[in-house]
Image: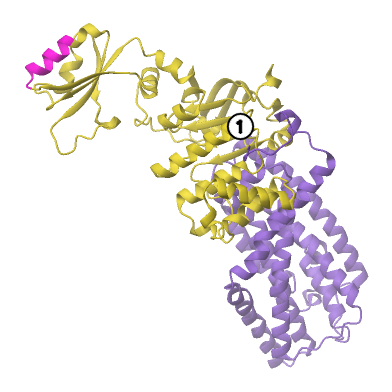
Chain colours: A purple, B yellow
Amino acid sequence: MNRYASTTATNAREAAEWSTGRIIRSNLRAVIGRAYPRVIGLTREPSWLFFEIFLPFLAVSAFVFVYRALEAPEAYVGFVVLGGAMTAFWLNVVWMMAAQFYWEKDQGNLELYFTAPMHLMSILAGMAIGGLVMTSSRALAVIGIGSLLFGVTYDIQQPFLLAGVFLLTMVPLYGMGMLFASLFLLWGREAFHLAQLLQEPIYFLGGVNFPLRALGPVAGVVMATLPLGVGLDAMRQLVFADSGVAGVLPVGTEVLILAVMGVVFIVAARLALGYLETLARREGRLTLRWQ
Amino acid sequence: MPDDLAIHARGVTRVYKAKPERVTALGGVDLDVAPGEYFGLLGPNGAGKTTLIKILTTLLIPTAGTAMVAGFDVVTETAKIRRVINMVSGGEQSGYGLLTAREQLWMFSQFYGLPNREGWRKVDELIEITGLTEQKDQKVRTLSTGQRQKLNFARGMLNDPWVLFLDEPTLGLDVAAARDLREHTLAWKAAAPGRTLLLTTHYMVEAEQLCDRIAIVDRGMILALGTPEELRRRVQAESIFRIELDRLPQNGGLAALTDLPGVLSAVSADDDGTDAAGSDRVALKVALADDSALTSVVTAVSERGSHLVGLAKSEPSLEDVFVELVGRGFGEEDGKDDLS
């Protein structure tokens, strides 16, 4: 019995002809395949409990104590806890999306991704979905612990809109990660420095630990560029409806901005990936490791 | 017709931009491999073998020339090529260490588009075939080098590739693991006729055992191409003798032998398998213009205080072919790194 081969095609040219349906199904399978290690990592590497919940929680606590010492409105404590939860997504985007292709290349996975019969966007989508599932559990842990320890109260009047805004924030945020994945690969080892360089400014400009409106005119720039800042501002307005602290723009406008950002970042990621592949194949960047 | 060939290459050239000067990894390679053929690229590090594989697997664009796999162009029809090929490299560390061997193969089966149930069935079958049943639930990062390479081999078989590229597949493996992998490759050949293999290696035995035809490559050029027998016949014109002596000849040693009329070369044969440890015996490999020169060699070693303890005429090996073509042995690097 032929235990190695199972295809029904009689030659290679016949086997290479795939229907559109088969192409779509294969790419969806690739999304699931790539998401799998991220989701399974939740149970296999419990060290994340310490590094990704306890350590970020220290920063959240510091801001809570500062606000309470300054007798700031109690809503600010809730703002910080929500910001701390959203930080987990940003960290995931920078380190496990943007820098991931570079690491995959170093491991030899990237070559196999390129030679496999699926689009690289499926791999990026799998990384994003897996990362989203993994990070959501961490974000929920930060919110749960923060709420219990600091007695945060929520006034959520439109829960479905809140869920929608959250998902709408994730699209451009992970779209940005997809875009950076290609760019970081092009920039080679500078990717590490770039990831570090981006981390703190985004915390600041994203208004993770304070209401974004406090940035004044700079908040307008954030509204045009950073999905984390826009989404966080909208979610704070929906979660703390009775806080009396205004957002930068009305929620409806911010939803529209997020939708546009989602399209822009995903399309840009697609274009960057196409450019990357052509450049990489022409210059040999896929095959030369550690550069 | 190129469309009917598994691999077709004409004038394939690849130049890397490197400082201070450009490096030509491939200098115009012509190659035709028929469907069902097992083809070997034999050459030292830096010969351009891996660069050619990268071009054929759509990872690199040739600087000049054309290449086709299964009748599809490697520059413009990458999607179709990727549906019918797979690649396994020696020392490959692909996948994710936190997954089990079984999970890792399943993950790759999804990348190759296998339906979920068929994917698991194929995974379990390949795990059994490659002898990884005991390790199937072990995390990948805990597998030994040999087990890891078997896993890579199983990954390469997941999509039943029509053209399989094996790039130094036994690099770094111990003798038993390397033999296992070669046996799996031969079993695949028997089980899946019509499938094509392109193997790069610098192990002569591997090339001879696995390949129907072999190309000897060096510095980006194919120097010779043919069946192992055809290649060996290229150096059949000379007579090669293996001479065993009780001690190394005095007064000039090997150099004195090479000065004799009719002697083309005389080198130690201890590096090709002779174990002279614990004795003064030495084995020499002497290439003669014709058999009549042997008498003067035997006389010369006797005059230099050595006694003949063994004499055999050797069939030329692929290494002899390589030395003849390149002017140096496999172990003698020319100082250039393989850029790929």
Q: Position of residue B167 (x, y in %)?
A: 52, 36
Q: Does residue B297 show up magenta in the picture?
A: yes
Near-viewer residue (A230 or A204): A230
* Viewer-nearest residue: A7 or A3: A3
Would residue A255 appear left or right of B140 to someone viewing this image?
Answer: right
Q: Residue at x 64, y 84 (%)?
A: A62
Task: Answer above or below: position of A175 versus A105.
Answer: below
Q: Position of residue B95 (x, y in %)?
A: 59, 53
Image coordinates of residue B113 in percent, x first then y, are: 73, 46
* Badge 1: residue crowd in 10 Å (few <14, some 14–19, many ≥20): many
- Residue at 65%, 33% (x, y): give it: B162
Q: Quadrant of residue A4?
A: top right
| B38 relative to B113 in the view: left or right | left
Of residue B58 and residue A192, the one placed in the foreground of this image is B58
Magenta stretch: residue B285 in it?
no
The residues colored magenta run B295-305
Q: Which residue is mark 1?
A: B55
B212 to the left or right of A166: left
Res. B192 in view: yes
Vertical position of residue B220 compared to residue A108: above or below:
above
